[in-house]
Image: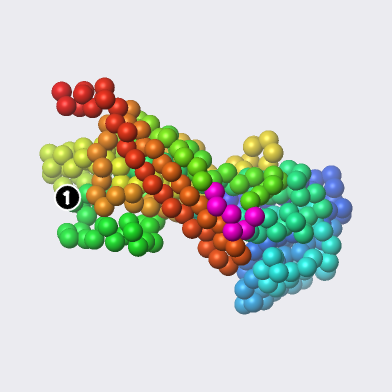
């Protein structure tokens, strides 16, 4: 995060805002502090009374201690304010309860780095006011999702004879930089996960289920077609052939793309979008994860509905991965289908 100009300044602003006017009063807990102890040191500079920086990997914990010592030597933070604790937060006892928990343990699928189990435990044991919004930065993490086209999934563009069924059923699912134009959202994104840290969280081992309905958007489908056409022409394809392939890409669903969104404060004035707020491609530290729903792209028309049922099985412990199962059905809009046939 040291060089991440999209995330780090927003985190720093949120931390300074939380500590402003209460310098020397608050105990801060940083879970997953990393080699630079970045958020822990930001909190110390902002006036935290004490910062407990937790790191599970021994070699990373040593680097964090070195970073803290360097900051103390430079006169940036007082000695003894930041203390590194080694291990998983779920297996450690803090010397005292924390007033503010800061962390960046959000995966490209928000819960992919154990955030459910970590925050459930923190609510139970580590925080002075576990159900108050002021106790967390970020306050909410979400996984947004949308049906997506995937250019290389199409026979005309992808590798010949590639076994897409194996990718769909055996994984792991394809991942893309969030600014990649190889994948395009064909409907308005919706929340697949919304994890509010100050609210009661499901216990480890729980199963979550939800159903979402996505309506295919004509404007987004045209945008996907235009972007695919531009990419193909830039790669040297003849315009007529590029137009034919791009038209197929823009009106076919390959899977459901997923990416995270972080809300750092109660007013939702400090938000980190890994893709654009509407799902458009943009540069990001995170990736877009695309579980394929089918071995070959499925044609859709504007107004068609993708009904998606998702099952999320939470690991029973911090080191047991969350498991996701997705099942989708295309419900065709008869009027749009009739128009397309005409």
Total marks drawn? 1
**Mark 1: which secondary structure?**
loop
The image position of residue 116, as x and y in percent, is 61, 55
Q: Is residue 335 above or below residue 154?
A: above
Q: Is residue 144 above or below residue 91?
A: above
The image position of residue 86, as x and y in percent, is 70, 73
Residues shaded magenta: 203-208
Of 162 and 52, which appears nearest the observer? 162
The image position of residue 6, as x and y in percent, is 55, 49
Seen at 24% across and 49% down, the residue is 296
Is residue 257 at all visible to an observer of this figure?
A: yes
Q: Name the image quarter holding the N terminus.
A: bottom right
Compared across the picture, whether 146 is left or right of 7 comes to: left
Q: Name the image quarter holding the C terminus.
A: top left
Query: Is residue 206 in the magenta section?
Result: yes
Predominant SS along the magenta part: loop
Which residue position is annotated with label 1?
Answer: 156
Give the image quarter of residue 315: bottom right
Compared across the picture, whether 155 is left or right of 283 comes to: left
Seen at 38% across and 51% down, the residue is 290
């Amino acid at each position: 995060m040291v060089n991440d100009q999209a995330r780090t300044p927003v985190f720093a602003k949120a931390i300074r805002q939380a500590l402003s006017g209460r310098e020397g009063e608050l105990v801060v807990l940083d879970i997953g502090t990393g080699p630079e102890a970045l958020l822990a040191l930001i909190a110390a500079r902002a006036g935290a009374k004490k910062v407990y920086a937790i790191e599970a990997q021994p070699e990373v914990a040593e680097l964090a201690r070195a970073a803290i010592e360097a900051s103390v030597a430079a006169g940036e933070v007082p000695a003894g304010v930041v203390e590194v604790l080694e291990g998983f937060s779920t297996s450690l006892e803090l010397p005292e309860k924390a007033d503010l928990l800061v962390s960046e343990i959000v995966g490209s699928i928000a819960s992919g780095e154990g955030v459910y189990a970590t925050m459930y435990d923190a609510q139970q044991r580590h925080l002075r006011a576990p159900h108050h919004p002021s106790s967390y930065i970020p306050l909410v993490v979400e996984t947004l999702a949308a049906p997506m086209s995937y250019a290389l999934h199409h026979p005309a563009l992808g590798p010949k004879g590639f076994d897409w069924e194996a990718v769909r059923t055996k994984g792991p699912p394809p991942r893309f930089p969030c600014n990649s134009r190889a994948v395009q959202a064909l409907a308005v994104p919706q929340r697949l996960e919304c994890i509010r840290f100050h609210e009661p969280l499901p216990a480890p081992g729980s199963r979550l289920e939800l159903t979402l309905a996505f309506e295919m958007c004509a404007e987004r489908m045209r945008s996907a077609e235009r972007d695919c056409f531009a990419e193909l022409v830039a790669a040297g394809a003849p315009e007529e052939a590029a137009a034919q392939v791009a038209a197929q890409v823009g009106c076919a669903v390959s899977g459901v793309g997923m990416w995270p969104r972080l809300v750092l404060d109660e007013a939702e004035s400090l938000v980190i979008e890994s893709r654009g707020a509407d799902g458009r491609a943009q540069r990001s530290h995170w990736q877009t994860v695309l579980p394929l729903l089918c071995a070959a792209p499925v044609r859709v028309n504007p107004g068609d509905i993708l009904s998606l049922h998702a099952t999320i099985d939470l690991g029973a412990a911090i080191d047991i991965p969350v498991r996701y199962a997705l099942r989708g059905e295309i419900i065709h809009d008869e009027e749009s289908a009739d128009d397309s046939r005409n």
